[in-house]
Image (tube, rainbow, N blue to C red):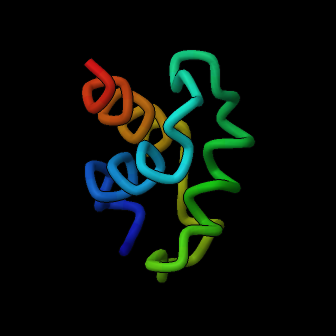
Amino acid sequence: MKWTDTLDIAIELYEKFPEVDPRYVRFTDLHRWAAELSSFDDDPEKSNEKILEAIQMAWIDEID
């Protein structure tokens, strides 16, 4: 998975952290959690605020 796979990352985070409300996750934590996913295979330094926001919004959509 790459940073551009925002929906896939969001789904995996939702499955890994079902008790977490993504609306209150700090981007530093979101970045770390995404980079630590077993299927993640991208340079951790290639993310940015726009990508993290897209992951967060997709994660919020998953819980709704």
Residue 62, percent across and down? 27, 32
Q: Position of residue 57 (x, y in %)?
A: 35, 27
Residue at 54%, 56% (x, y): give it.
Answer: 47
**Residue 17's x, y, as percent?**
56, 43
- Above or below: residue 64 compared with residue 41: above
Between 44 and 39, the one lying in front of the other is 39
Would you identify the image quadrant in which residue 45 lies? bottom right
Image quarter where the N terminus lies is: bottom left
Count the marks: how many? Answer: 0
Residue lying furthest front: 19
Q: Residue at x 48, y 82 (%)?
A: 41
Q: Which residue sits at x=26%, y=18%?
A: 64
* Residue depicted at 37% across the width and 46% down the height: 10
Quarter of the rendering containing residue 8: bottom left
Towards the viewer: 47 or 27? 27
In the rendered image of this protein, does residue 26 appear above or below residue 37? above
* Above/below status of 28 relative to 13: above
Q: At which x and y percent is residue 5?
A: 29, 61
60 horizontally vs 39: left or right: left
Residue 4 relative to residue 40: left or right: left
